[in-house]
Amino acid sequence: MNAALAAAATLVAVAFSLSTLDRWLRRRRPHELAWTVSLALFALGSAALWWAESAGWSLGAFRVFYMAGAVLNVPWLALGTVYLLAGKQLGDRVRAWLVLLSGFTAGVVLFAPTKAAVGGRELPTGKDVFGVAPRVLAAVGSGVAALVIIAGALWSAWRVWRGRSPSFGADRVVAVPRRLVLGNVLIATGTLVLSGSGTLAGRLGKDRAFAITLLVGITILFAGFLVASATPRRPMAAPPTD
């Protein structure tokens, strides 16, 4: 069951990343590229969980899962929020720092010394495997970035609900305000679900909790993206008359 849930989360993340990649290739909007990077990392982390639940955990699988799923994917998703709300100038500055921090984080997590061997079928915890540095990176990367996404989505939804522009960097025209409000609420909800794996871990077990929150969270995020980015239907042209 855990492997099936992780596989489903991986497939949803791949479909999500292909959707944002297609939009970026057509429009070249920087927030869509940031989302694509984030979702590709999410798919990589989910795939590592899928592999480990099927074949057993190893140190390599846990490093990939921890790096992509626990540290890097949420900050890149938050970068998209910065681009949307604050504009390209500030977004480019944040992206430059994020690229450097991503390289540093990847080096730390992939080559950090471990305190215990990794094996078996049960999901290890960061405090049992790593020292201080990888765990601090995970806490800051996930916690601060999730706060940016949730606060930005709710703030944008409130602005649109009041009839204002959803961003403060530049005025944006909203074709269907109610749809954008619902999409932002779903994005905030999906981020909260992904952040709630610790609560479920005590009730369902770590592996089942992570698998459920990964699948439910990424599905809600995908739904929010589809709702917020859907274009309104054009009215059908009336047939010509004599």
Image (tube, rainbow, N blue to C red):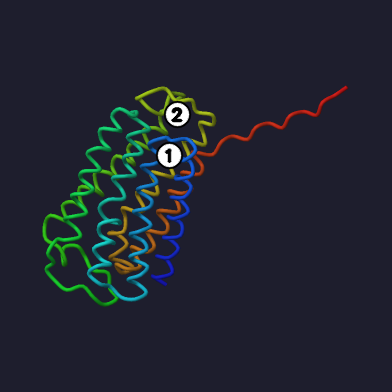
The residues tagged by marks 1 and 2 sit, at their Cα atoms, a distance apart of 10 Å
Q: Which element type, helix, strand or loop, lies under badge 2? A: helix
Q: Amino acid at mark 1?
A: Asn
Q: How packed is label 2: few (under 14 Cα within 10 Å), some, or many (20 or more)?
A: many
Under mark 2, the amino acid is Val
Crowding near the residue tagged with mark 1, few <14, some 14–19, many ≥20 C-alpha atoms within 10 Å: many
Residue 184 in the image: state x and y as whole percent.
Answer: 43, 39
From what the image shows, is residue 60 above or below residue 217? Answer: below
Q: Which mark is residue 160?
A: 2
Answer with left or right where residue 239 lies relative to residue 169: right
Along the viewing direction, whichever of 162 and 235 lies nearer the viewer: 235
Residue sitting at x 25%, y 57%: 67
Q: Secondary structure at mark 1?
A: helix
Q: Quadrant of the N terminus?
A: bottom left
Determine whether label 1 and label 2 are within 8 Å by CB.
Answer: yes
Residue 4: where, in percent of width, then height? Answer: 43, 69
Image quarter of residue 148: top left
Q: Earlier in the sequence, mark 1 or mark 2?
A: 2
Where's the C terminus, which quadrant? top right
The label shown at residue 30 is none
Q: Residue 141's spot in the image, x, y percent? A: 23, 48
Give the residue pinned by disc 1. 184
Q: Is residue 197 above or below residue 94?
A: below
x, y percentage for residue 6?
40, 65
Lateral position of residue 94 relative to residue 168, left or right: left
